[in-house]
Image (cartoon, rainbow, N blue to C red):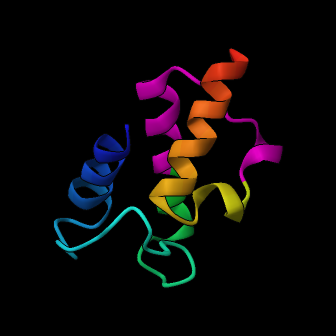
Amino acid sequence: MQERILTYIKTELLAGEPADLTAQDDLLGSGLISSMAVFRLIAFLEETFQVRIPPEEMTIDHFMTVDAMTAFVRDRQAAGV
């Protein structure tokens, strides 16, 4: 899951840069991805991993890093939502 999210971010949101992006990099605080890109990312996560992400769960904590997203999506899957 983590690698799939990283690949999506690199190819679709960052157009291949930076190539050395890791799962621990701060995507939001560093400005690597914009707020509009976050909405594309949420749509990708919902469609790809069959989860629903309600507006109240769209917080910085859940989307700051790929590690945080992976944990959040796994929690949503485990909860069956």
Question: What is the residue that sits farthest to the bottom in this orientation?
Answer: 30
In the image, what residue occupies the spot 28% across and 70% down? 21
- Whether residue 50 is visible here, answered yes or no, is yes
Answer with left or right where residue 55 lies relative to residue 27. right
Q: Which quarter shows the N terminus?
A: top left
Q: With 16 as the anchor, is 79 left or right in this view?
A: right
44 in magenta: yes
Which region is colored magenta? 40-58
Quadrant in which the C terminus is drawn:
top right
Q: Residue at x 65, y 21 (%)?
A: 78
Where 3 falls versus 17 (above or below)? above
Q: Residue at x 77, y 45 (%)?
A: 57
Q: Position of residue 79 (x, y in %)?
A: 72, 20
32 relative to 64 in the view: left or right: left
Q: Is residue 15 above or below residue 31?
A: above
User: In this view of the protein, can residue 52 be seen by the observer?
Assistant: no
Image coords of residue 32 (percent x, y): 41, 77
Magenta residue check for 46 = yes
Report x, y in % for residue 52: 65, 27
Which quadrant of the figure has residue 55?
Answer: top right
Q: Nearer the viewer, residue 2 or 44?
A: 2
The kind of secondary structure the magenta stretch mainly shows is: helix
| Residue 16 percent location from the top left of the image | 16, 66
